Amino acid sequence: MNAMNMAKTAYATNQAPIRTPRGTEYEAFARVTRRLKAASELGRPGFARLAEALHLNRQLWTMLAADVAERENGLPEDLRARIFYLSEFTAQHSRKVLRQEEDVAVLLEVNMAVMRGLRTKEQAA
């Protein structure tokens, strides 16, 4: 590649959208939620995929819980507490889903509610 082509490439418009932190969180929830939904629709034959999706969902919620537990976190105290509670709930409910005592639907609802909140905040900003 010659210098002229390199310069054009360097200054070309970036095709990837710039994401805000909230947009990144939304995308993480969207990916995990899609995987949970797709795996749950497979029924019994999709149990391994469901277990994997549940693991990813719990990882996401664990990261959120760790974030809101930090003193430097700028979210209001009440919201931080609710997010931490949801992380605990997600872990407990996921165990019940894996034992086939509960359905994944509640986890999907929780994730979608968070996504709606993230989308609303993103649009307001």
Image (tube, rainbow, N blue to C red):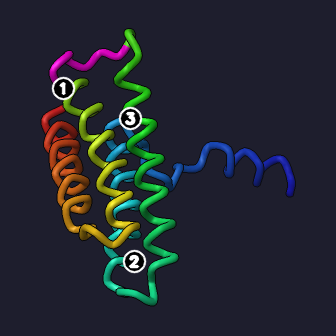
Query: Secondary structure beneath disc 3?
Result: helix
Give yes or no for contact between labels 1 and 3 (Cβ–Cβ under 8 Å): no
Give yes or no for contact between labels 1 and 2 (Cβ–Cβ under 8 Å): no
Quarter-of-image position of residue 50: bottom left
The quadrant the C terminus occupies is top left
For residue 56, which numbered disc appears in the image? Answer: none
Please name the residue that numbered disc 1 is placed on: 79
Left or right, 55 with reference to 27: right
Q: Which of 58 and 3 is in front in this view?
A: 58
Residue at the spot 51% in from the left edge and 66% down from the top edge: 52
Separation of marks 1 and 2 at Cα, in angstroms? 30 Å
Residue at the spot 38% in from the left edge and 57% down from the top edge: 95
Quarter-of-image position of residue 42: bottom left
Residue kind at label 2, given as amino acid type: Ala
Please name the residue that numbered disc 3 is placed on: 64
Q: Which of 72 and 81 is in front in this view?
A: 81
The magenta segment is 73-78
For residue 39, which numbered disc appears in the image? Answer: 2
Residue kind at label 3, given as amino acid type: Leu
Name above or below for residue 75 compared with residue 115.
above
1 or 2: tag closer to the N-terminus:
2
Residue kind at label 1, given as amino acid type: Leu
Residue 92 drawn at (x, y percent): 32, 49
